[in-house]
Amino acid sequence: MNKVLITGVAGLLGSRLASWIIENTNYEVIGIDDLSGGYTENIHNKVKFYKFNLNNLEALKGVFEKEKISIVYHFAAYAAEGLSPFIRKYNYDNNLITSTNLITCSIQYNVSRFIFASSMSVYGDKYKPPFSEDMKQAPIDPYAVAKYAVEMDLEIAFKQHGLNYTIVRPHNFYGINQNIWDKYRNVLGIWMYQLLNKQNPTIFGDGSQIRAFSYVDDSIIPFWNASQKDNCIGEIINLGGIKEYTINDACDALINVTGQNLNQYI
Ligand SMILES: NC(=O)c1ccc[n+]([C@@H]2O[C@H](COP(=O)([O-])OP(=O)(O)OC[C@H]3O[C@@H](n4cnc5c(N)ncnc54)[C@H](O)[C@@H]3O)[C@@H](O)[C@H]2O)c1
């Protein structure tokens, strides 16, 4: 049976894709996660799970040696963009060095496709949304620098070693299996935590800032196609909702969904 390796399999995007692959395809799913930000409860019981940090190159080589992986999905990262200037070394160790370990093994063990979850943050503050894939990356924080570096390394690995990569840049996904305990991440997750803990949702400024949001399961088919369609090889794909909401509207929608009454906390 063909095997897909998913890193970050206990997290939001990785866990949902893993479950879908198991339930809808003939592929076996091998998962790696160090559980630094994800949860074992998120992992489908048919995933063959390895718990370790991707900075452990020997452990990673062991998995490739044993499992004969054909497709790699690389989701593992600590995605705290705003915090990254204050945790520089951790950011690069955890998001860049780990990725080069995975790329090295993918070259050595001849995987057929490598799908990397990058980020819209690579655009920095140079352009106004919507972003198109032909805009040049211009990162302004270490998290985005690490993502950009991995994008570049993949391009080189493709040219020099024939590693068939696709870069997918997800934007603002939320939903089932999301980590809502980390206050440095996705704004909807932060609000969910606050509402569950009977706190007022934090809004910076007047809340008129515009954002687009996407439900996690809407990412599954695009991610799956990225490894199945030959015209995705060597491509960058921006992935996210196009309908925009103000931060105030998004917050009101969440308050309605959770049935929480803001005024009760004032
Ligand atoms: N969710 C989004 O909207 C979004 C937007 C832009 C980019 N991304 C990128 O997509 C990927 C997945 O995002 P997510 O929202 O599912 O994140 P997530 O935090 O829910 O999942 C990441 C998983 O990776 C694991 N992990 C982190 N560092 C690891 C390491 N060194 N070794 C092994 N496991 C490790 C964590 O334990 C966690 O389970 C990330 O790379 C993120 O940067 C996501």
Image (tube, rainbow, N blue to C red):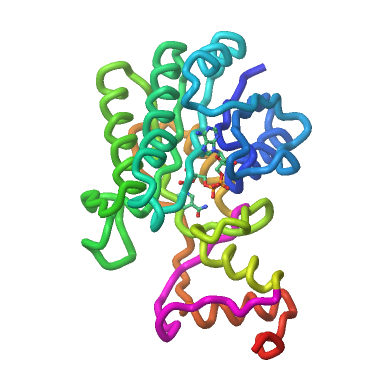
Q: Which residue is at a point 36% across and 51% down the rendered structure image?
A: 86
Q: Nearer the viewer, residue 245 or 76?
A: 76
Q: Which of 176 and 181 is in front in this view?
A: 181
Q: Is residue 117 left or right of residue 68?
A: left
Magenta residue check for 246: no
Q: In this view, does 227 lie above or below 16?
A: above
Place of residue 160 in the rendered image (x, y in percent of width and height, measured from the top left): 26, 18
Place of residue 15 in the rendered image (x, y in percent of width and height, measured from the top left): 65, 41
Q: Nearer the viewer, residue 181 or 147?
A: 181
Q: In this view, does 63 lie above or below 168?
A: above
Q: In this view, does 154 lie above or below 57?
A: below
Q: Quadrant of the N terminus?
A: top right
Dominant secondary-structure state across the stretch colored magenta: loop
Q: Quadrant of residue 173?
A: bottom right
Q: Give the range drawn in magenta.
A: 198-217
Q: Can residue 231 be seen in this view?
A: no
Place of residue 215 in the rendered image (x, y in percent of width and height, measured from the top left): 59, 59
Q: Which residue of the protein is positioned furthest toward the right in this rendering?
A: 45
Q: Which residue of the protein is positioned furthest toward the top in this rendering?
A: 65
Q: Which residue is at a point 61% across and 80% down the rendered structure image?
A: 200
Q: Which residue is at a point 61% across and 21% down the rendered structure image?
A: 3
Q: How many marks?
A: 0
Q: Which residue is at a point 47% across and 71% down the rendered structure image?
A: 243
Place of residue 150 in the rendered image (x, y in percent of width and height, measured from the top left): 34, 35
Q: In which quarter of the image is residue 190?
A: bottom right
Q: Is residue 149 visible?
A: yes
Q: Is residue 93 left or right of residue 228?
A: left
Q: Quadrant of the C terminus?
A: bottom right
